[in-house]
Each structure stands twice: as structure tokens, then as C-alpha cells.
Amino acid sequence: MDGIWLEAFKDTLAMMPWLLGIYIALEVLENRSESFIGEKISHRMGAAPFLGALFGCMPQCGFSVIAATLYTRRCISLGTLLAVFLSTSDEAVPILLAQHDKASLVLRLLLVKVLIATIAGYAIDLVRGKKIVPPAHPPHAPIVPRGGHRHCDCHTHGLEAPPWKTFFLFPFKHTLRVSFFIFAVSLAFGFLVKKFCGVSPGHLFFAGTIFQPLLAVLAGLIPNCAASVAITEVYLKGGITFGSAIAGLSASGGLGILVLIKENKNRRETLFILSLLSGISLLVGIILNLF
């Protein structure tokens, strides 16, 4: 049993410096681009689903939060919102980049998700129409008001926070939080493999059945970075297929889902959106698993 603990600890420790560097870079990128991206996507209706899919694949779930906010203000269409949610992978990209031998998977993952999100986004707008109800809030109001805050799983970003907090302390705290989840998943996976010695990891997670992508989708709907961490780690360890990982990560809108639930007053519409997100993700996972 000590070997399982030690292996999980060593694997997690090896990833932490890379994760910290990646999160610092992402913090710089987000601080420079969030408002710009939000404004661009809400003013280009024809290209909005494609732009949503493209921007949504940026690591973490910051843009899914922006998209959910824009949708509740009725500044973007349903197709654009779903395109963003479907292309969002939350913590999957940083985790893949932190493992050198797996970094090549990032391009494959993003290309597949952007393609799925773009097709789904335009298809939904084609069926439902792109008409947007006049917003309850001014469409040109900033996504994050001056002096306000934007939130992620582990901390609150104050727009007036000192640079050392924004570009080091916050990424460091995020690295610790994600590393904890990586360690927990690695440990649980190790214990499962040990307990069911002789059973392949794939069979532990219902390989070859509809239950695997379904479980991945249900996990992905959890509005917390732990969901995408678990899905990515289990995939990297051979527990689930690429199709099931795509299904789970497509449903993983992160805190964007939480913002939608909280801010959208139409509960029936919110349930419909989440059902649509789950259904598309599951269908994509099943299709990919067939090939």
C-alpha cells in the first residue's frame, strides 16, 4: 500500500512546477483578454458560434463564465452558449501540458472539441433561430464591472489586486488545489487497480458499454475543477476511452454552469440547456467510441 501512496505523490509532485508555470501564463492571458473576447463575441452574431467554440477551448473555465453571463443578458444566442460549453475543458489542458509525454494529446483534444462545438452551435441556432430577446441589462455593460471581481474555484480575482497576488499567489493557490485533486484521483485509481488485480482499468469503468460515457458526462456536469481533473487523470491512466473523455470534458462547463443556474431566472430553460449539453456530449462520446 505504501507504494501506491508514494507513486501518487511522486507523480503529483513532478507535475506541480509545470502546472504553476502554466497557470501564471494563463493568468496573464486572461487578464489581458477576457473583456476583449466578451465584447467581440457579443457583436459578431454570424461568426459567434465558431468564435465561442474557439475561445471556449482556452484552458480553465473563465470564458464559459463570460458566455453564461452574456447569455443571461441575452447578448448571445443559445447556439453560441452551447458552443462555448462544449469546447470548454476546464483543467484538462494544463494537466495534459504538464505531462511531457502526453502534451501531444492537447491538439487532438482541442481540434475534436472545437469541431463538435462549432457544428452543434450552428445546428442549434439553425433549428431555434438566432433571435435574441432584448436584454434586461445593458448589452455594452462590462462583463466584470470596474472595481468588481471575477471568481474561480479557489479564489476571487480582484481587478485592483496587487500584481504579486494576481500573477503569483492566485496561480500558486490554484496549483495546490488542482494538485490535491490529481493526488486524490491517482491514489483512488491505484487502490482500485490493486483491489481488482487482474482486471484491466478499462473494465473497472465499464469499457465497451454506454455506461462509461454516461458516467463521464455526469461527472463533467459537476461545476468544479475536480470533475475535469478526474476525467483527464482516469483517461491518462487508461481507465476510460478517448470518446468517453471527450464526452465528459464536453459536458464540463465548469463554473459557467453554476453561473447559468444562478443567474438565469428561467429554470425550465436552464434545465433544457443542461439536458441539451448532456445529450450532445453523450451522443458524441458514443459515436467516438464506435470508431
Image (cartoon, helix red, strand yellow):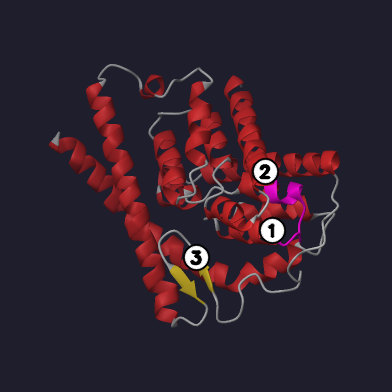
Category of crowding for the residue at label 3, using alpha-carbon neighbours closer than 10 angstroms: few (below 14), some (14–19), many (at least 20): few
* Residue 12 in picture, x, y percent from top left: 30, 49
Q: Where residue 72 is drawn, which disc sits there?
A: 1
Give the CA separation, mark 3 to mark 1. Answer: 17 Å
Q: Which residue is mark 3?
A: 151
Query: Hey, what amino acid is under mark 3?
Result: His
> Considering depth in this image, is 213 or 239 the residue closer to the camera?
213
- Tags 2 and 1 touching, CB below 8 Å: no
Q: Which residues are magenta?
A: 71-82
Give the CA separation, mark 2 to mark 3. Answer: 25 Å
> Considering depth in this image, is 218 or 236 the residue closer to the camera?
218
Q: Which residue is mark 2?
A: 268
Identify the residue at image location x=54%, y=44%: 252
Classify residue 179 as left or right of residue 269. Answer: left
Classify residue 111 as left or right of residue 236. Answer: right
* Residue 21 in picture, x, y percent from top left: 41, 64
